[in-house]
Amino acid sequence: MPRPSVVAEGTDDRVFAALASPVRREVLRLLRDGGPQPVQQLAEHFAMARPSFSEQLRVLREAGLVSERKDGRQRFYRLEAVPLAEVQDWLSPYERFWRERMAELGKVLDRMEDE
């Protein structure tokens, strides 16, 4: 049995692993911009075999980033953004860190201009 691995406050490693792939990030972008879409429509954007693309969707599904709905023979995928909010919460302290560093750099540069 695989052990659950938590990065921070419920953010599962599967979410970060899913986001590591440019293909999966593009699928998320397509779903964000175009709403729920059938597999065939999503697959048209990628030059890969259907089983490989299905594996990409499986990873996103298992990470909770997409949901699947069957309508007859078609499968529709929809973006599930809740795990992304958890990632944003995890990244927030790093954003503050870099914002503070850039503000300090700006002050140093301003002083250099005066000298």
Image (spheres, rainbow, N blue to C red):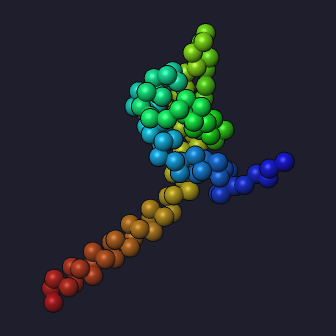
Residue 101 appears left or right of 58: left
Instruction: Choose top left, top right, bottom left or bottom right for residue 57.
Output: top right
Answer yes or no: is residue 24 visible.
yes
Residue 3, placed above or below residue 100: above
Residue 12, placed above or below residue 67: below
The residue sitting at 58% across, 20% down in the picture is: 75
Answer yes or no: is residue 54 visible.
no
Who is closer to the viewer here, 78 or 48?
48
The residue sitting at 47% across, 46% down in the picture is: 22
Q: Residue furthest top?
A: 72
Count numbered badges in the picture. Answer: 0
Residue 39 appears left or right of 104: right
Who is closer to the viewer here, 87 or 69?
69
The residue sitting at 34% across, 76% down in the picture is: 104
Residue 20, placed above or below residue 28: below
Q: Where residue 43 appears, x then y in whole percent?
A: 48, 28
Instruction: Choose top left, top right, bottom left or bottom right for residue 65.
Output: top right
Q: Where residue 93 appears, x then y in whole percent?
A: 51, 63
Q: Residue furthest bottom?
A: 115
